[in-house]
Every structure is written in structure tokens, then in C-alpha cells.
Image (cartoon, rainbow, N blue to C red):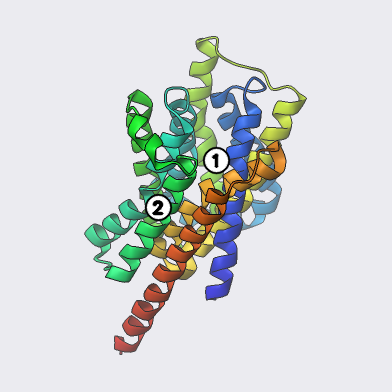
Amino acid sequence: MRRNAYLFLLLTTLLWGGNSVAGKLAVDHVSPMTLVFLRWALAVLIMLPIGWRTIKTDWPVVRRHWFVLAALGASGFTLFNTIFYTALNYTTAINVSIEQAAMPILIMTANFVFFRLRVNWAQIAGVVLTIAGVILTACHGDPRRLLTLELNFGDAIMLVAVVFYSGYSVGLRLKPSMHWQSLMLSLSVAALVTSLPFFLWEVAAGKVIVPDTHGWAVILYTAIGASIISQISYIRGNELIGANRAGLFINLVPIFGTLLSVMIVGETFQLYQGLALVLVLGGIGLAEYSGRKIAKSSSAATP
């Protein structure tokens, strides 16, 4: 079960890292809000034939828990991505990467406040190591660059996006028991509905970039890879080892994004990128070892 969780979460963060590259490739080929709306429109079209039978069976559950499902889809699928794309218009990728590293801390804090889930010092040390890896990646191996960072409107709203996705990760504890096909279809529909106002605003503002062939390729990847497959994997990994431990894997996203940029965009691989990967994986390993001991202790204490 634990190995399966690691595979799910590694696949998730690899696909999300690819989404960072896709975001770079989307510039001038499709506008941000149009990308968000079309990726979920396509995701719904893909999920409909897959989840049609199960959603009919699970419909009473969907009706009873529609607010929770809508909140999860809106916060994790729509609002995070919408704010993320908007923030990048005002701030740097360095700032965004560092701010996203706060997610595991927020997830652990929220789990303690709302569910009294405790962490130990080894888990905290693991979080610190992963954050160090993210910062090393973000500043391109030169910590002095952190002294030149300036905070602005983009950073403020990116912190809001971080809160939304952290809330989504913790909120997965509240999702109803239903088939995964029904769950993914329900969340995708919620994301599509909540992304519509942002798309209409972009249209009204005259900022729409209609996707060309290149843009549609990006939309196809984000719909299948970064939306459907990655979200199913993240939800499953979260179920298997919990939000605290699963959330720590999020700090692999900028690492994988950088490595994929080397492979796909042709950027040069640097020594600091390898060191950052070691730090993040070492932090996850430390936190996971400690987290398993806590889980075993809890199981042994349960009559």
C-alpha cells in the first residue's frame, strides 16, 4: 500500500512538473483563463463516458454531498490554477516556487487545528529539507538572489492560491465514499462551472488568445495529464498515507519542472538541480520514515 502511494504521488508531481513546462509553452498560443476553462471542458468530455454508469449509481451521494464536492473542485481545480496563472503576470517564477513550498506547512497546521493530527521533529526536519531544495532550485543555486526578491500583488494572490490548494488537500478527508470515476467527474464538472466566470471575464476584457495547434496540444496535455490522471493519483495517494505525508511530495513539482525543462525545452542541467533533488527526496524520506512510525504506533494503540 505504501509503495503504491509513493508511485501515485511521484506520478502526480511529475505530471504537475510537466504542467509548469506546458504553461511556458502556452504563452502566446492560448490565454490563461481560456486554458483553464478548456482543460476542464475537455476533462469533463473525457470523464463522461468513463463515469456515466457510476455517477448514476452514486447520484444520491452526489446530491447529499454536493457542497463538499463543489468546494473541492472549485478550490483545488479552478481557483488555484486561475490565481496561479494570474500571479505569474505580476511576479517571478522564483517567488511562485518558494511560495508553493509553504503548502506542506499549511497542510500540517490545518490538520492539527481541525483534526488534531500531530507531527514530530523528524517530520518537521523533512519539511525543512524539502523547502531548502525548492529554494535552491528557485534561486538557480545562488542564495544571494533571494536578497533581490521583491514582493508585490502577484505574491499576495499566490499566497491565496497556496491556501486554496492546502485547503483542498486537507478537505479530501471530507470527500464522500463513492467510485473514483464518479468523484473525478463530479470534481471536473465543479471545476468547469467555476472556471466559466473567469473565462467570460477574459472574453469581455478582450484578452482572449484563441488556441492554435500548439495551444490545443497544451490544452490536451493539461486536461489528460495535469488534470485527470494527476488528480486521480493525488487523491489516491492522499487516501493511502494521509494529507500530511502526501502534501510533502508537492515540493517535488518545481524540481521535476526544472528537470523536464532540461529535457523538453533544452535548458542546461546544473549541479544545483541534482543537489536540490537530493534535498527534496531526502526530506521526504526522513518525514516518511517518521510518519510510518507514528502510523504504526497509532495502529498498535487502537484496541
Find residue 121 and report its horizontal and vertical position in percent. Answer: 28, 69
Residue 189, label in figure: 1
Q: Mark 2 to mark 1: distance in Å?
A: 37 Å
| Dot 1 amino acid type | Val
| Dot 2 amino acid type | Ala
At x 63%, y 52%, the residue is 229
Disc with the residue nearer the chain's start (2 vs 1): 2
Quadrant in the rendering for residue 4:
bottom right
Q: Secondary structure at mark 1?
A: helix
At x 47%, y 53%, the residue is 250
Find residue 193 and report its horizontal and vertical position in percent. Answer: 51, 33
Closer to us: 119 or 97: 97
11 up-or-down from 37: above or below: below
At x 25%, y 61%, the residue is 112
The residue singled out by tag 2 in the image is 132
Q: Are marks 2 and 1 in contact (CB under 8 Å)?
A: no
Find residue 13 and report its horizontal and vertical position in percent. Answer: 56, 53
Q: Quadrant of the N terminus?
A: bottom right
Tag in front: 2 or 1: 2
Query: In the rendered image, is residue 64 in sight?
Result: no
Quadrant in the rendering for residue 227:
top right
Query: In the rendered image, is residue 4 in sight?
Result: yes
Whether residue 303 sits left or right of residue 240 in the image: it is: left
Find residue 200 and report its horizontal and vertical position in percent. Answer: 52, 19
Q: Crowdedness of circle 2 by 10 Å Cα count: few (<14), some, many (20+)?
A: some
At x 48%, y 24%, the residue is 198
